[in-house]
Amino acid sequence: MMMPHSSKGFSLLEILVAFVILSLTLGVIMQIFSGGLRNVGYADDYSRAVYLAESRLAVLGVEQPLQEGTMSGELDQRFRWQLFIQPYREMEATDHGQPNMKLYLVSMKVSWKEGEQTRSIEFATLRLASKK
């Protein structure tokens, strides 16, 4: 009894080509996912830096006096912040007898290390304070 010459199934070469295509596809998919995870980490770091800056700027002039100068600090041994306060302009008294006010330019820089690279974000705002 003889088998017909046409056989059913895949040859070894076809299986090897399928495995090569599968491995290349999986490699590309893994790179896409790892890039997405890396971007999530970047976004988390930027969000923490914004939160730190907002909390420092919120207490300025309320819990902490608003005066010219530079301040700096550290959070979690990873994030460093620098705060610069400088006069912007003095405001004259109005006809209603309100006291003279002084306008300050407040700049804040938050930086952190990410591997070998240093990343930073900067904020600037104006704050109004009474002249003493």
Image (cartoon, rainbow, N blue to C red):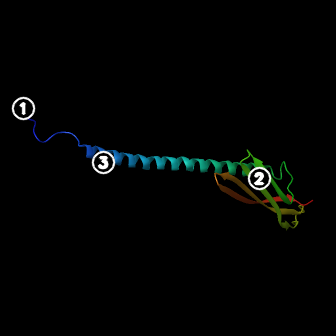
Cβ–Cβ under 8 Å for marks 1 and 2: no
Cβ–Cβ under 8 Å for marks 1 and 3: no
Tell me if residue 77 comes above or below residue 106 in the rendering.
above
Residue at the (43%, 48%) spot, across then down: 27
Q: Quote the CA–CA distance across marks 1 and 2.
A: 91 Å
Tell me if residue 84 comes above or below residue 76 in the rendering.
below
Tell me if residue 1 comes above or below residue 11 in the rendering.
above
* For residue 1, side relative to residue 53 (left or right): left
Q: How far from the left and from the top, in percent, is residue 129?
A: 85, 58
Seen from this angle, which residue lies furthest top?
1
Question: Of the residues shown, which amino acid type is indicated by label 2?
Answer: Leu
Q: Earlier in the sequence, mark 2 or mark 3?
A: 3
The residue nearer to you, when weighing 38 against 60, is: 38
Residue at the (87%, 53%) spot, across then down: 65
Q: Quote the CA–CA distance across marks 1 and 3.
A: 34 Å
Residue at the (34%, 44%) spot, across then down: 19
Residue at the (39%, 49%) spot, across then down: 24
- Give the SS element for disc 1: loop
Seen from this angle, which residue lies furthest right?
132
Residue marked by disc 3? 17
The residue nearer to you, when weighing 50 against 17, is: 17
Question: In what quadrant of the picture does the C terminus appear?
Answer: bottom right
Q: Earlier in the sequence, mark 1 or mark 2?
A: 1
Q: How far from the left and from the top, in percent, is residue 130?
A: 88, 59
Q: Earlier in the sequence, mark 1 or mark 3?
A: 1
Q: How far from the left and from the top, in percent, is residue 71?
A: 82, 55
Q: Can you tell which mark lies on residue 1?
A: 1
Residue marked by disc 2? 57
- Give the SS element for disc 2: helix
Q: Can you tell which mark lies on residue 44?
A: none
